């Protein structure tokens, strides 16, 4: 029982840290169990939702390719994510059936693509 309590406390501390840093959206979108780091994703990869190029059930963390090292903000939905990088560019990846990625296509992307950013609005 003590072991469970310790794990629960550690998990709770990690969740609080993620909530305060804004990274929790990425974890709840498609990382499932991946609390190693924001870019270490661990979940069922039946649709390659982690961007790692794999479509098997993983269970172990895998690096999502081409996600910028420094992300200022991130937003995630069920099928796609977008991030603002340290260079103030917007990168999006995931499902794009209605143009959610903002790159003027409707093609899904397993890797981050540059989103068209509107200016002067």
Image (cartoon, rainbow, N blue to C red):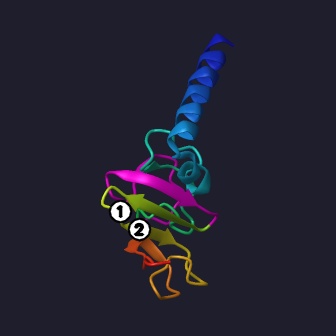
23 up-or-down from 101: above or below:
above
Q: Examine the rendered structure and indicate whether residue 17 appears above or below residue 102.
A: above
Q: Position of residue 118 (x, y in %)?
A: 45, 79
Report the front residue among 70 and 13: 70
Q: Is residue 13 magenta?
A: no
Residue at the spot 53% in from the left edge and 46% down from the top edge:
22
Give the residues in magenta.
Answer: 54-78
**Does 71 lie within the magenta span?**
yes
Left or right of 21 on screen, residue 113: left
Q: Nearer the viewer, residue 49 or 113?
A: 113
> Mark 1: which secondary structure?
loop
Q: Quadrant of the N terminus?
A: top right
The alpha-carbon separation of the residues under discs 1 and 2 comes to 7 Å
| Kind of element beneath mark 2 | strand
Task: Identify the residue at image location x=61%, y=21%.
Answer: 9
As drawn, the label of residue 88 is 1
- Image mark for residue 120: none
What residue is disc 2 on? 90
Give x and y (percent) for residue 63. 37, 53
Q: Residue furthest right?
A: 1
Q: Residue at left 57%, top 46%?
A: 24
């Amino acid at each position: 029982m003590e072991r469970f309590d310790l794990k629960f406390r550690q998990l709770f501390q990690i969740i609080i840290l993620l909530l305060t840093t804004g990274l929790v959206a990425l974890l709840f979108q498609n990382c499932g169990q991946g609390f190693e780091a924001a870019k270490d994703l661990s979940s069922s990869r039946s649709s390659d939702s982690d961007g790692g190029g794999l479509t098997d059930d993983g269970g172990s963390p895998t690096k999502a390719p081409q996600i910028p090292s420094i992300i200022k903000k991130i937003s995630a939905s069920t099928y796609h994510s977008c991030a603002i990088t340290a260079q103030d560019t917007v990168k999006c990846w995931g499902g794009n059936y209605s143009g959610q990625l903002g790159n003027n296509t409707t093609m899904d992307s397993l890797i981050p693509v540059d989103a068209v950013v509107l200016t002067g609005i």
